[in-house]
Amino acid sequence: MTYQQLLTNYRDKHGKLVEPRQGFDSLHKNLWLAYSIGVKRGYYDVGTYAAKPGDHSWGDRHGQPGTALAFDIRRKGWLGRFGWGYRNARKLARFYWEHHQALNIDYVIVGRELISRSKPYWHPLTTGDTSHDWHLHVSGVA
Ligand SMILES: [Zn+2]
């Protein structure tokens, strides 16, 4: 499916795109649809823009807040790498990856694994970061 087809499906079902908690400007527009799909699947916004290095502060300019080229979402009841919460998160991660071209997604992290355009298969996250045991990270392409 193309971006336009996914957007049409989304609009038929849900109407408007969902504004991130920190505002539309906090998230690159290329990720608005992916973000909105996640929210409509019962996930909530953990953050888009953050004043820290990396994809969450992509677009930072001279110390002024920019936009994020990534978003973090989680779901009530997802408490770790077990149970339905984790299974559901992995299902959403697989959906994102299936449509990563259309949704402008660069990589997805869930649990202690990621999949990316440079390594397009699930492989271990080697940063030691365990926070994705309970949240999904989605990075985009600008
Ligand atoms: Zn993140």
Image (tube, helix red, strand yellow):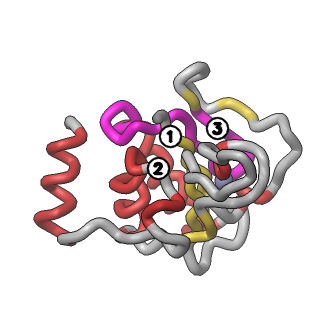
Determine the CA span between mark 3 and mark 2: 21 Å
The percent coordinates of residue 90 (x first, y second) are 53, 52
In this picture, residue 83 sits left or right of residue 105: right
Secondary element at image label 3: strand
Q: Which disc is residue 25 wearing?
A: none
Looking at the image, tell me whether mark 3 or mark 2 is earlier in sequence order. 2
**Residue 61, above or below 100:** below
Q: Which amino acid does label 3 sit on?
A: Leu
Q: Which residue is drawn at 15% across and 44% down?
A: 5
Q: Position of residue 40 (x, y in %)?
A: 35, 70
* Most distant residue in the top direction: 118
**Dividing the picture into quarters, in which one does residue 87 lie?**
bottom right
Tell me the residue that label 1 is attached to.
Answer: 140
Around disc 2, counting alpha carbons within 10 Å, would you say few (fewer than 14), some (14 to 19), or many (20 or more)?
many
Q: Label 2 amino acid? A: His
Q: Which residue: 70% across, 72% down?
A: 79
Q: Are marks 3 and 2 in contact (CB under 8 Å)?
A: no
Report which residue position mark 2 lands on. Answer: 28
Q: Residue 89 sits in which quadrant?
A: bottom right
Q: Is mark 2 on a helix, strand or loop?
A: loop
Residue 107 included in the magenta stretch of the image:
yes
Give the residue type that dot 1 points to. Answer: Gly
From which residue to which does the magenta span run? 99-115
Taking depth in this image into account, of 34 and 54 the one nearest to the observer is 54
Question: Pointer 3: what residue?
Answer: 114
Mark 2 or mark 1, earlier in chain: 2
